[in-house]
Image (spheres, helix red, strand yellow):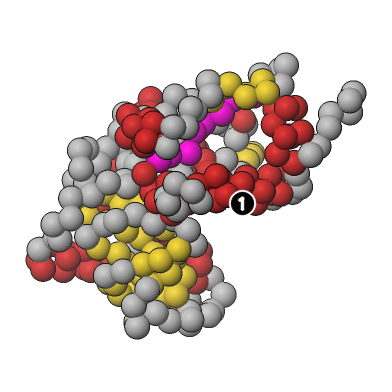
Amino acid sequence: MDLYHSIGRRKSCRAYIQEPLTPNQLDELKKALDSFEPLYPNAPLEYRFTSETKGMFQVKAPHYLVFSGKGEEGEQENAGFIGQKLMLWLDAHERGGVWLGASKDATEQRKRADIIILAFGTVEGSPHREISEFRRKPIAEITNAVEDECIKAVHLAPSGMNIQPWYLEKREDTVKLYRQILKPPMSLAYTIALLQLRKLLSKSGISTCRLFGRTQSLMCTKKRDGTVIVEVANKQAREFYQTLKVKVPSSVDLAEFKQRTLGLKSKGD
């Protein structure tokens, strides 16, 4: 099956109809998994379904797929490579999925060598989105070959927090991939913001797991004056924020945010 078409329409799905797939549908999924070739043949993976998970990013779904290994080098890359193919396969079959980062199998099947979990099933609404709904950096910020069709596909690839920490440099018949490693204060900012969020939510009885499962990360664009323009949240996220009496700002003063959140002052202060 050609999965290329699904690259331009797949999305992370967090709201599911709780009716499970049929045994035949699950068998089809297993066959698809077995047909996907890994990046590293010497680091084979094991797969299993589980009924319950726990962790930071929780989504209520009818099915959870656990990627597990034996602690060999290359297993994490294989899990991401094969798992993302499965995401495209699900999209092509009118179903959806979402990665559950920092989550674990909550049943007795849990293993020390488990790598990551993918929730999936039949979604509420459409499992697809329009190309205009992808929240990505301008393609010129991640490559010097903006017209390359393969790099256009990479431009739509998902990444944690939608930060796209990579750059692709094309020279003749070679493409070099550079990875951006987050350093302080940005890496520290994520940790501090999460801790502050947990403190704010403690009185509401809503966990960060539920918050992340019901809402979305918002694309932000920094202007020259230091102001950050914040993307408008989708309907589901807006409704959930309203129940928390949280107002999502349309813009953020970056200098003021650093001062309030991290205690950092601008050079001119």
Residue stretch in magenta? 215-222
Q: Residue at x 48, y 27 (%)?
A: 247
- Would residue 27 appear left or right of 110 to someone viewing this image? left
Where is residue 134 shown, x and y percent of the image? 41, 32
Is 245 placed above or below 180 here? Answer: above
How many numbered badges does the structure rendering display? 1
Give the prevailing secondary structure in the magenta stretch.
loop
The magenta stretch spans residue 217: yes
**In the image, farthest residue toward the right:** 268
Q: Residue at x 60, y 34 (%)?
A: 143
- Quadrant of residue 46 in the image? bottom left
Q: Is residue 91 visible?
A: no
Question: Between 267 and 144, which is closer to the camera in this rendering?
Answer: 267
- Quadrant of residue 139 in the image? top right
**In the image, farthest residue toward the top:** 225
Where is residue 27 shown, x and y percent of the image? 16, 68
Question: Between 28 and 1, which is closer to the camera in this rendering?
Answer: 28
Q: Secondary structure at mark 1?
A: helix
Question: Between 79 and 115, which is closer to the camera in this rendering?
Answer: 115
- Would residue 225 appear left or right of 241 to someone viewing this image? right
> To which residue does mark 1 refer?
195
Q: Is residue 49 visible?
A: yes
Is 25 placed above or below 263 here? Answer: below
Q: Quadrant of the C terminus?
A: top right
Amino acid type of the residue tagged 1 in the rendering:
Leu
